[in-house]
């Protein structure tokens, strides 16, 4: 796993596979190096962005020096985004996710516990990782009213808050504990196979571990065509981001051969 992004230079275009979004931040993997990247979008533009997990985007890096944040060493500045396709095959998703996943013998993001003091981060540890889930995860509210996902990690059960707004709204609407992958799928629309975990921006002097996105093991060919067409049509119209008026539906229930 390439935890820290390499130096891409100035005015460089990257082809990235989008993984998740949290607030106004996008989390992705550079297709060429398998390095994680994360970047901010302006809130007013992000509100209307057409976002798909495993979407392929071509992005241009900003030519201005970016902000250096030790809690987000993979941070890049992006000046232009163009959607170019959609990853959907099970083998491609598995390869991408597993090559960038964390070993269960190591603490998630390099430290134990749910958060870390901003003063202790050095920029030498990753702020993004992918967790491969089993069938033993559960989603419920904790004592603070947060929607969380619990899952086995090493010898313990770990629990993280769900940060992705769209996912959180679905689970809040369900308004009940979801104790099996089948129950989760009935609400989410697919059985989550992978989860993106990231270190959130500091709040009150601490950075929390957050589950910023749940990912399927594959996307049906039919759904992939819909997702790809939606983004390519917006790009052809010269309008990006575009208002996404339809809910993105992902299904791993398909007879398509890999």
Image (cartoon, rainbow, N blue to C red):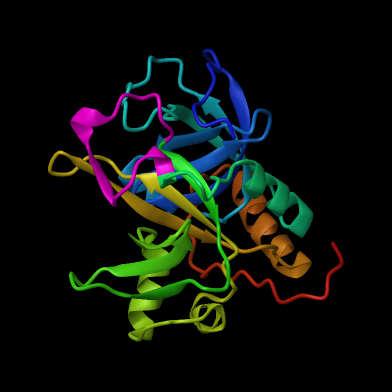
**Residues rendered magenta in the picture:** 109-126
Q: Residue at x 54, y 49 (%)?
A: 19
Left or right side of 140 for 254: right
Q: Residue furthest front?
A: 155
Give above or below for 149 relative to 110. Answer: below
Q: Tell me if residue 21 is in the magenta stretch.
A: no
Left or right side of 119 for 96: right
Q: Nearer the viewer, residue 177 or 39?
A: 177
Q: Nearer the viewer, residue 180 or 231?
A: 180
Rendered-image quadrant of the C terminus: bottom right
Q: Nearer the viewer, residue 110 or 250?
A: 110
Coordinates of residue 102 in the picture (x, y in percent):
54, 45
Q: Residue at x 19, y 42 (%)?
A: 206
Coordinates of residue 235 in the picture (x, y in percent):
61, 45
Left or right side of 12 for 254: right
Coordinates of residue 207 in the picture (x, y in percent):
25, 42
Rendered-image quadrant of the N terminus: top right
Q: Please count the marks in the image.
A: 0
Q: Tell me if residue 112 is in the magenta stretch.
A: yes
Residue 226 shows in this picture: yes
Residue 222 figure quarter: bottom right
Give above or below for 149 relative to 111. Answer: below
Q: Residue at x 31, y 26 (%)?
A: 69
Q: Nearer the viewer, residue 245 or 217?
A: 217
Q: Residue furthest left?
A: 204
Coordinates of residue 11 in the picture (x, y in percent):
54, 16
Residue 220 figure quarter: bottom right
Residue 89 shows in this picture: no
């Amino acid at each position: 796993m390439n935890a820290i992004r390499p130096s891409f230079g100035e005015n460089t275009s990257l082809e990235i596979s989008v993984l998740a979004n949290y607030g106004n931040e996008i989390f992705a993997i550079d297709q060429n190096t398998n390095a994680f990247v994360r970047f901010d979008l302006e809130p007013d533009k992000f509100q209307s962005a057409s976002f798909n997990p495993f979407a392929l985007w071509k992005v241009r890096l900003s030519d201005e020096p970016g902000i250096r944040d030790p809690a987000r060493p993979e941070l890049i500045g992006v000046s232009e985004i163009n959607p170019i396709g959609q990853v959907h095959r099970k083998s491609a998703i598995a390869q991408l996710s597993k090559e960038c996943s964390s070993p269960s013998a190591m603490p998630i993001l390099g430290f134990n516990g749910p958060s870390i003091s901003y003063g202790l981060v050095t920029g030498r540890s990753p702020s993004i990782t992918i967790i491969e889930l089993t069938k033993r995860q559960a989603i419920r509210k904790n004592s603070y009213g947060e929607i969380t996902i619990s899952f086995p990690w090493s010898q313990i059960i770990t629990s993280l808050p769900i940060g992705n707004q769209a996912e959180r709204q679905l689970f809040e609407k369900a308004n009940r504990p979801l104790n099996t992958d089948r129950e989760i799928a009935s609400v989410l629309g697919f059985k989550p196979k992978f989860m993106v975990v990231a270190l959130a921006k500091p709040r009150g002097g601490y950075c929390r571990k957050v589950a910023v996105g749940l990912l399927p093991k594959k996307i049906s060919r039919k759904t992939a065509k819909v997702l790809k067409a939606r983004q390519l049509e917006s790009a052809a119209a010269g309008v990006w981001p575009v208002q996404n008026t339809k809910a993105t539906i992902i299904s791993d229930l398909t007879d398509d051969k890999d």
